[in-house]
Amino acid sequence: MAKQIQKEIQRGVESWISLGNRRPHLSIILVGDNPASHTYVRNKIRAASAVGICSELILKPKNVSQEELLDITDQLNMDPRVSGILVQLPLPDHVDERTVCNEITPEKDVDGFHIINIGRLCLDQHSLIPATASAVWEIIKRTGIETFGKNVVVAGRSKNVGMPIAMLLHTDGQHERPGGDATVTIAHRYTPKEQLKIHTHLADVLVVAAGIPKLITSDMVKEGAAVIDVGINYFQDPVTGKTRLVGDVDFEAVKKKASFITPVPGGVGPMTVAMLLKNTLLAAKKIIY
Ligand code: GUN
């Protein structure tokens, strides 16, 4: 599905350029030496290039000042060559992430983290939507998984992932930005495990974005449910000592019960990158603003 969307974006980019427009350009600011962040950014740059989107990487040391980051963002905001701006998170503790996210002009905010994009998302208005939430939405809709009147559980309430996913799935299908019309339950770190199980047993669609390996076991899942694993956990194998990527779902056991299930790695991750590129094309074409 991610490859299919990338092809659609590539075609969209080429037809946009063939009309005499500038090639879409994504500027990425990466602070410090967090290995996971460097991997994510490398993947984004590679995927952008594959669909014909130019990108530039602005690398800064972890002691960069907030003021300098805001200055860089201001420059990019004003630069007509730049269609999309992304500041890779997390940022060092001395930098306020909210201040930085709000400095990016909403029209170029391809992460959808600016307070205006979040506010519009919450009001069911058109906006640039956070890529992970868009990825979950596209997986559900393109697979043909029903959400209208269905029970959805979202495990995880982070502002960048769980909250926007829940927002898309519970809202009205007839509004400006259509929602999924589902009954959505949001669970989080203080939901007792036995309560979580009561909720997940009712779920037709279970979206897990908690950051807890094997949080969801087979006994918690309803037969035929669709399970979407948004977890990204680095797990060190006690035998081999090697680090590998695991999700939040006990994949091997749960896949026997689920109608659909996304793997980690290879499921929501590549879809998220594809949706970021889609946002970059939307920003270049000024479709939202
Ligand atoms: N860090 C982890 N995921 C993301 C993301 O989607 N966007 C940004 N900017 N940083 C991240």
Image (cartoon, rainbow, N blue to C red):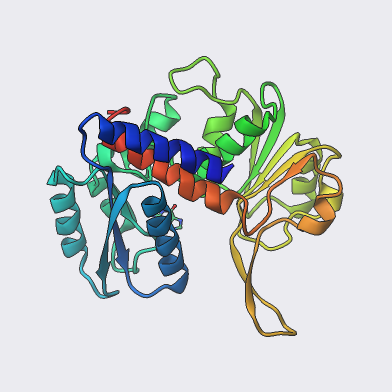
Inspect this view and state whether residue 107 appears: yes
Q: Nearer the viewer, residue 168 or 19?
A: 19
Measured along the vertical axis of the image, is residue 252 above or below residue 228? below
Quarter where residue 211 is shown:
bottom right
Q: Residue placed at 72% from the left, 55% from the top?
A: 249
The quarter in which the N terminus is drawn is top right
Q: Which quarter of the rendered image does ligand 1 occupy?
A: bottom left
Residue 97 % position (x, y): 33, 57
Q: Residue placed at 70% from the left, 79% from the top?
A: 237
Q: Residue placed at 33% from the left, 73% from the top?
A: 32
Residue that extends furthest to the top in the rendered view of this protein: 174
Q: Nearer the viewer, residue 141 or 187?
A: 141
Measured along the vertical axis of the image, is residue 160 above or below residue 21? below
Residue 7 % position (x, y): 48, 40
Residue 143 % position (x, y): 67, 33
The quarter in which the C terminus is drawn is top left
- Left or right: 114, with 142 as reference point: left
